[in-house]
Structure formats: C-alpha cells, structure tokens
Amino acid sequence: MWVMAILLAVIVFGVGLRLYQLGAQPAGLYQDEAVNGLDALAILQGELPLYFPANNGREPLFVYVMALTTALFGNTMLGVRAASALLGIATIGAVYWLGAVWKSPRLGLLCAAVMSSLLWHVHLSRVGFRAVSLPLLIALCFALAGVAIKTRSKVAWIGAGAAYGLLFYTYLPARFSPLALALSLLYAWVWHRDWFMEQISDHWRDYLWAFAAAAIVLLPLAWLTLSQPELVFGRSGQVAIWNPAVHQGNPIGTALNSIGSSLGMFTWRGDWIWRHNVPNRPVFDLLLSMAFFLGLLLAGQRWGVSPALAISVIWLVVMLLPTTLAEDAPHFLRAVGVLPMAAIIPALALDEGLDLLERLETQPVLKRLLPIGLALVPVVSMGFTTRDYFGCRGPFALSLNGFNYVGCYQSDEVRGFFFQQQATELALEANEAPGALIIDQRFWESFPSLRYLLDPQREIILVEETENLPQIDPPFTVIAWPHGDLSRVYEGLQSNLHSEAQVSVVPGPDTRGDNDPTSYQLYVMWQVTTANHNPEPLARFANDLILEDVNLERNGARLSVALSWRSDQPLASSARVFAHLLGDNPGELLAQVDEPPGTIAYSPLSWPQGSVIIHPITLMLPPGEAQSAPTAWQIRVGLYDPVSLERIPPVESRVPTGDDALLIDVAPSQD
C-alpha cells in the first residue's frame, strides 16, 4: 500500500512539474516553437496540410494538437506549450497502461513514476517541439498490442495498428520503428517459436486487422513521400554522419565518437544543446542509473524468458540510431524514441527487486521498509530533476529559469537563446505599445516568435529598412533596426507629429545570436501618443531645451529615471545629458549615465518642435547600496556641449540647482 502511494505521489508531482509556470518558463519562445505556432494559426484559419514544409519540414500531428491549445489559450507561449504538456502528461498515462498490461498495476506505477521523474521528459513537456509526441504513440502502440494479444479484441488490434500508423506523423525517428518491429518479430520467432507460430496460424486475421489499420492511417503520408521525397527526407541527409560536411573527412572516427556519445548519454554525459536539456546532464541520476544497468543485466540473463525486457532493449538500441547516425550525438530530440524504454527498463528492475523482497524471509519490519526504500528511488530522482531544472545548486550548477539560465550559467553555449528571449520580450512589449505598429521587415522575417505572439487585432505595417514611414496619426509605435540609416524614421516622425505629441524612446537590449562574434543592440522603439504640455516645466536650459518633468522608480538595484524633454525651436547644436546619483555622504557618486537627450537613437537635432520626448535612463546601484533606503540621495541632471565639454546651465528651474545642474531628491518613499 505504501509503495503504491509513494509512486502515485511521484506521478502527481511530475504532472505538476510539467504545468508549473508553463506559459513563462523557459523564458522566451524559441524559433522552432514559434514556427509550429504559426502553422497552428494557419490551421485555425482553414489550412489543413498533411506536412509542413517550413523549418526543414515537419510532421503534422503535434501541430494539429497545438492548433487546439492555441484555440483555447490564444497565440501565447501557453498556447504553444500546452500542447507539449498535454502530450507529455498523456505519455505518463500511456506508460502506466503499458506496464499494467505487460505485468501488473504496480509495474505500471513504477513506469509512470520513472517517466514523471526524468528531466529529459519534463523539459520536452514544457517546450513546443513535436518530438514529445513520439514517446506517447510508441507507448500507446505497445499497450494496445498487449491488450490485443491478451484479449483477442478486434478493436484493440485496430487501435494498435492505427497507433503504429500515427507514429509516422509525429517525428523523424519514427522511420526507424519498422526495423525495431522486425527485430522484435525475429526475437519472437527465434526464442518463442511455438507461441509465434500459434499466433500466425490461429490469429492471422487479428494481425491483418492491425496491418490494415496501420496501412490506412499511413497511406496519405506514404503517398506524399513518394510524390515529394525531397520534402520528407531532405533534413535527414543534412545531418547524417556520412555527409562529408558532417564527418569532415573522418567517417570512421565520427561514427565511433557518435556511438560512444550515444551509449554514454544515459549515465555519463547527455545532450549539450541548451534547448534540449540542461547541458551535459545525463538521462539518469545515480540511483536510476543503477536500476537501468540492473535492467540491462536482467535482460541479458533472461533474454529468452522475459519478452518485456528483451523487446525493451531491442527498441532502445534501434531508437538510439537516429542520434547515433547523425551529428551532435547525443541529441535528445533525435533520441526521443527511446524514452518509453528508458522508463520501462529501470522500472522492470525495480519491480523485480520488489518481487524478490516479497519472497525474502526476513523480519516483518524490514519486509515492510525495504520495499518502501525501493519505491523511494523515483522520489530521489524527482528531487534531482527539480533541483537541476528549476534551481542553481548541485553538480551541474545550472538553472532553466528560461533557456538563458539566468543567474546560474551564462557562457557562450547558451547565448543564442538570449536572442530568442529578447525577440519574445519585444513582441510582448509591442503588444502593450500604443496604436498601430510600424515594424522593420527584418524583424518580421527573422523572428517567428514576433509574428506568432503579436496581437492579431493590431494594425501592423511592415516597412523595408530603406522605406519611408507611412503617414499616420498618433498613437502609433515604430520598431526599427538601429544599425542602419535612421534618418527615414526621424523624417517620418517629423511629418507625423504635432505640438501635442509625446514620444517615448525605448532602446532595445544588447543581444548576441549563436553565430554572432559580438553583441549589438537589437532594436529601438518609438512609442508615439498625444499629451498636454506641462504648463510649469521643471527647468529651461540655456540652449532652449526644456525639461518638463522627471519620474523616478526604484526596483532593487535598478533606479529608472524618465526625463521628459521638449524643444520649442530648432537647436543650434547638439547636447549631451548627464545624470549622477549622489549618495548620503557629500561628494559620494553611486552611479552615472552620460548620453544624448532622447538616447543615441533620437538626437535633439531630430526632434519635432513642441513634441515631448521621454528619455529613459537606468542607474544601477553598487552592490553595497542595492538594499539600502536613501536618506539624502539626489539625482544631479544637467546638459553639456559634447565639443567644448562645457556645461549648459539651467536658466529657469523649479528645483534646486548646483554646479550648473538640477538637484532632484530621491525620497525614501520611492524605494
């Protein structure tokens, strides 16, 4: 009873790990997820393709499930990832059913508990990759086949065949399943020949029903494959180890290295690619590794008398081939077909251990406690998974607080996801921006996540990087590539704004893609609204720049300062603004920023006359001051000439001044 309760608790907790903050973690929508989401939106708009050609071609089953979750949750990160969570949770149920059919409900719970605790499967259930659908169909196919063999149910045989046909609509590695099926039948013929011949002679009609169901389900995809083989097989040739671009003139060495890496993924070193796994973390922790090895030893010892173990090992080996025969081994997406067996083999070993303890003659207390100890193995594994996936402790010192491992791991190996996360944040920020969206075509083409996440009800205007902005009245928002000629943006703002316009300049973050040698600013956003002028501006400077207002907001170590500027007439020359955060002690400088008013992306020389320009500044506090409350802090704000470096003094001010600058108190209530 206690054993069953413990295993059930692990399964419930595993379901929770797959749902916890599903729409927020991992942070950012990876481009492959977004492409799936865009195809899901196309399905909802009436398109019903059998195969999706974008992104090297993709099987359809997962995308159609995503269309359902997108219909429920909208074009959001949750809409994408709910499909994975749904299929991942269903896989836990399927492996329970498989274990129960193969032997007993206890084995079913052990299989489900091991699957629930695997970080590999937890992660796949939280990201929008179609690979998560393959383990579900493999487990369902085996479970239905087991029911069919035991009950002789025609419905079960048809279901098993249909499930096998659907395998090919999930993910590329399904194409290796005929080899695994053929080797399983060969095993049955060699080691269980009497039973095998009886099945063929007495129940061939049942097998014919299964074959017919599989053929009918598979027929549309088979026809497409024959008519357009390059569409279905194009990706396989790109990544195969016999491709000269992959083996680099050393095919034997590449093959041996790939075999060793694939075999070592279970207990030594797993996938290093951050979007598939906590880099280098193996499939199993120490305890489950021991159970896995014990299962393999049992399979070798009982090969001829334990079909469950033997067939599990056969499928494990065959379904490793998609990663063994391709680059980047071990690749946890290409190896995903082994997941059901990776759960079943250690579960069978643990179940064998429980059987042994039941037969063991020992003290009653030990006889009760030892089975509980074995049942706690998935509990320990669940603890390791929770720590390594959501925390920063342990030997891996990593965290999946988003694919970017914030606070734990920031090496070049993961920099590519900053790129994707920031594109996601751009989309979410654009959804909150006012009015129509005017977006450089570059962002639309480069970031599927932007296309997927943007509110479909918004007016979106795409412009080329050399194209002038359209004529449009406020409110509107411009998102531009900051590394080209921005004069077209300035001219467009000049022609579209009036004296009551307000422009908030939002510089994008620095980013760095997978193949970028250095970091760079991702975008600049101009948010244009209408606003009344402050009848009593804070200050007027000698060059006729007007500071209408200053807004302060502190968040921990970050002090955000919004400077609202206005120019009622053309400026004779440029200027730069300085903002100094002064501490409690006289002359103490805690932080400073020096840049043109309106940021480097929007110089005062380009401002429309009479418009209000909101210039954001961030002052980062030193570590020793981050948690302290200000008592006499001040912001010193001023202007200077970038050529002569002489300060431009304020000629009118409603706040105290000193050293030709404004002195603005940072009140304790603003902490």
Image: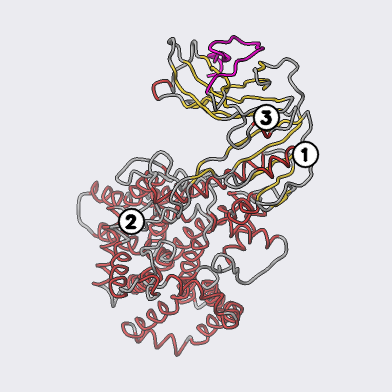
Q: Is residue 648 magenta-colored?
A: yes
| Marks 3 and 1 in Cβ contact (< 8 Å) | no
Q: Name the secondary structure under disc 3.
A: strand
Q: Which residue is mark 2?
A: 282
User: Is 138 placed above or below 501 here?
Assistant: below
Give the residue pinned by disc 1: 496
Q: Earlier in the sequence, mark 3 or mark 1?
A: 1
Which of the two residues, 218 or 512, is positioned nearer the viewer here? Answer: 512
Residue found farthest to the left:
362
Identify which amino acid the numbered label 2 is placed on.
Answer: Pro
The image quarter containing residue 584 is top left
Residue type pointed to by label 1: Asn
What is the quadrant of residue 498 in the picture? Answer: top right
Label 2 – label 3 distance at C-alpha:
53 Å
Indicate which disc, 2 or 1, sits on the residue closer to the N terminus.
2
Q: Which residues are magenta?
A: 645-671
Instruction: Please name the residue shown 50% across and 52% down the image.
Output: 126
- Considering the numbered disc 1 on the image, is that residue within a helix, a strand or a loop? helix
Residue 433 lies left or right of residue 93; in this view the side is: right
Above or below: residue 492 compared with residue 343: above
Mark on residue 574? Answer: none
Alpha-carbon span between mark 3 and mark 1: 14 Å
Assign a secondary structure to mark 2. loop
Crowding at mark 2 (Cα within 10 Å: few <14, some 14-19, many 20+): many
Rendered position, 19 above or below 171: above
Q: Kindly give the residue lying farthest to the front in the view shown.
A: 644
Q: Percent position (x, y) of residue 427? A: 62, 46
Give how far apart the Cα atoms at labels 2 and 1 are.
Answer: 57 Å
Magenta stretch: includes residue 213: no
Q: Which residue is mark 3?
A: 613
Mark 3: amino acid? Ile
Front-most of 594 and 619?
594
